[in-house]
Structures are given as C-alpha cells and as structure tokens.
Amino acid sequence: MTLRNGDPESVSEFEKRLSALASAHAVLLDNHWRSAGLIEVLKSALSPLGIRERIKLDGQDMQLQPNSIISYLLAFHELGTNALKHGSLSVPNGSVEITWRLYGAHGERLHLIWRELGGPEPKSQPTSNSGMKLLQRVVAADLGTPINLRFESSGLVCEFDGPTEKEPDMMKRSGSN
C-alpha cells in the first residue's frame, strides 16, 4: 500500500515502517524472543520519531506476548507518525496521552487509548491515509480486535484491546502449530 504511488515520500514511509519492524525484532532479541513490557515497546516505537517527551504514559507495565509485539510496535509507530505529520504533534503545544488498563479474570487483556490533544483541526477522516489503513487492517487482524479511530474535539482518538502475556497464545487456542 505504501509504495503504490512510487514517489519519494512513499519510499521514505516504507523505509520508516521497515525501521519500526527492525525495532520490534530488536526488542524481541533483547528479550530472547520471550515477552516484553508494554512500556519498552512504546518507547522503542516512539523514540526514533523524536516525540517521546510530548507523550504521557499512564498505566502499569505488563508483559506482552512475543507474537503480538510486532503488531503493537507497528500500531504505535503508525499513530506516532500520523500525529507528527497531521495531528497533535505537528504543532508546538500538541501532545499525546496513552492510557491503558488490564481486564479479564487474570488481567489477560489490555484496553489501550491513544488520545491526541491540542492539535490542528482535522482535514480528513482518520482512515484516509495508508498508515491508518494498515493499522485498521493488518494490525487489527494480528491482534484479533477492531481498532476504533475517531476524531474528537481534542484530536484523534484510537482505542483497541489486545492480548497480554497472560492470554493464551492465539496459535495455541486455535489448535494451530
């Protein structure tokens, strides 16, 4: 989807996504292909964008399944890139709040909200660019949950649920090897 136009900006976006995937693999390697903490994944995705100081994190750290780390990291990369180009981080005083909580009998599910604050008035729907389409199609399918994107008066809000390390591995649940 990213390279369909073939222009230099598309190539740059593709290279950034490859870099995000490399970051995800680095997190996995650092953790010996075992679980990794949500905060580590968030920092790994957002630090290369140079926006970390404008993002507030609110929630207890928890471990994520190795097979979901790439999807989480891609989601945060796409949201961060979008905020930097079009949203709250494209203006000097804009910011992002990321909040999450655990739910389920054993805290096996994560509910996460990405909320942009102080950004410019939106010019298009949040699903109109390739990054947001990637988020809603690929990442949502990988995490097994819909991704809710909407504009509020404060800016883009993205809400989704996903697995934690405590949720049985999706491959094991489905009986696949």
Image (cartoon, rainbow, N blue to C red):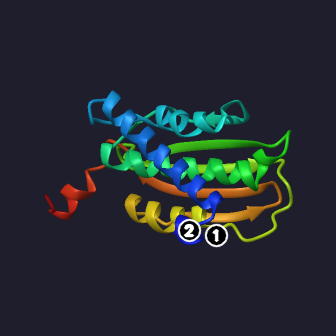
- Residue at the disc numbered 1: 127
| Type of amino acid at the residue the image marks with label 2 | Lys
Which residue is depicted at the point 39% across and 43% down?
Answer: 107
Q: Nearer the viewer, residue 46 or 35?
A: 46
Viewer-side residue, 76 vs 38: 76
Residue 40 coordinates in the image, percent (x, y): 48, 31
Left or right of 74: which side holds 143?
Answer: left
Is 138 left, or right, of 132 in this rendering?
Answer: left
Dot 1 amino acid type: Thr
- Callout count: 2
Residue 7, quarter of the rendered image: bottom right
Give the position of the C terminus as an image quadrant: bottom left
Between the C-alphas of marks 2 and 1, the distance is: 6 Å
- Name which of mark 2 and mark 1 comes first in the sequence: 1
x and y, in percent, of residue 111 in the image:
51, 51
Asked if disc 2 and disc 1 are in contact, CB closer than 8 Å, the reply is yes
User: In the image, what residue occupies the spot 59% across and 53% down?
Assistant: 12
Kindly identify the residue that appears in the image at 31 percent across and 32 percent down: 29
